[in-house]
Amino acid sequence: MKKNQFAVIGLGTFGYSVAVELAKKGIQVLAVDNNNETVNRISQFVTQALIADATDEKAMEDAGVADCDSVIISIGGNIETSILAILIVKEFGVKNVIVKSSSRWHSKVAAKLGVDTVVYPEFEMAKKLVDNIVMPNILEQIELSKDYNLVEVVAPKEIWGKTIKNSNIRNNYGVNIIAIRKHVPIINDDGQSDIKEEINMMPGSDDEIGRNDILVVIGSEKSVAKLRG
Amino acid sequence: MSSIDMEDIVSSEADHIELGKFYFLNNKYDEAVSEFKKVLEINPGNAEAYYNIGLIKESSNLMNEAKEMYSKALAVKPDYKIVRDRLNKLIGIEN
C-alpha cells in the first residue's frame, strides 16, 4: 500500500463500516480480518481485502500494513488480540494509530501504548442517547472544551420572528449563533409534499429567526441550558 | 351577493388535500393540519393526509408525533416509499 492510505484491522460491524465509508470517500483502504467470509464480502468496496491474523507480525507486514499512514484497529471482542495488534503496528512506526476500545481498561492500555486516538463508540453513543432523552430540544452536541459546546438547539419561542440583533441572544443567553437550519416545505418532482433543509451559515445580525428554526450555537453548558428552557 | 364560503367550495377529500398542501407550502401549519384532519374525517384511511401531518410535525421539530403519523400512513399503505424513507431517517436507519 502507498502512503496516505488507511488500513482497517478487524472487520466487525464498526471496522467494516469505517472501511466502507472511507472507501466511499475515495480513500485507499486495506481491510484485514481473519474471517474469510467477511473479507470476501468487503472486497468489492475497498482497494484491497486480505485474510490475515492481526497478531502475526509477518502476516501484517506482508499485507502492507507497515506502509500505511493510518491504521484503525477495530478488534473489540478480544482485548489481548487488540493489544498485540497495537504493539505490532506501533513497532512498524505507523504515524497515526486509531483504536476502537471496548472498555475503559482497554482505552487505558491503548493510551499507554502510545496510540494517537482511542474511540469508545458504545460509551459515546450511550452518552449521546441519554442527552437526547433528557434534553429533547438539544439535537446535536459537540464538546469543544471542558466548558464550551457546539450545540444544535430548537429556537425558543420567545425569539421567533425576531432578527438576531433584536433577539439579543448573546446578552440574554450568552451564546453565539453560527448557523440557522430550517425545514422548508416543497412539492417534489412527483407532486408530493416534502421538506428540504436549508442552512444559513454565519447568519447576519439582520437575519430573522423563524418559527421552528434550529440554531447552531456555541456557548457554555450553562448558557445552552438556559437557551433550551 | 352572498360571500363565498370556502367550505362550500372545498368539500371533497382531494380538495382538502390540495388546500392543505397549499397552506403547508405557505408555512400556515395550523390551517394545513386542519385541512388534513378534515380529509381523515371523510376518509380515515387516507395515507397522504397522515403523511402530510407527519411532515408538518417534523417541520415543527415534534419528532415523536411525526413518527406516529408516518407509522399511521404506512399502516394504511405499506409501500408508501417517501414515508418509509422519512420514518427510517427519523428512527436513525439509513435508507
Image (cartoon, coloured by chain):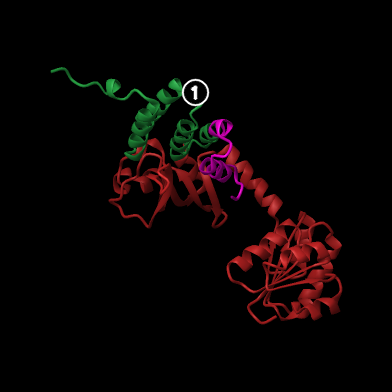
Residue B74 horizontal/vertical position (percent)? 56, 34
Question: Where does the magenta region start and end?
Answer: B71-95
Badge 1 is on which residue? B44
Q: Position of residue B24 (x, y in %)?
A: 36, 37
Q: Chain of mark 1?
A: B
Q: Is residue A54 left or right of residue A161?
A: right
Which SS does the magenta portion mostly show?
A: helix
- The residue closer to the viewer here, B11 or A183, is B11
Instruction: Name the residue at 75% across, 79% down.
Output: A64
Tell me: A180 left or right of A79: left
Which quarter of the figure has residue A159? top left
Seen from the viewer's position, the closer of residues A116 and B47 is B47
Relative image position of residue A134 (x, y in whole percent): 58, 37
Residue B69 versus residue A41 in the image, above or below: above
Q: Against A32, is B56 above or below?
A: above
B36 to B55, vertically: above or below: above
Mark 1 neighbour class, 10 Å CA radius: few under 14, some 14 to 19, many 20 or more: few
Q: Quadrant of residue A90?
A: bottom right
| Extreme residue toward the left, this view | B1
Query: What hue does chain B carry in this figure?
Result: green
Tell me what hue chain A is rendered in.
Answer: red
Could you tell me which residue is drawn at 63 percent across and 43 percent down? A129
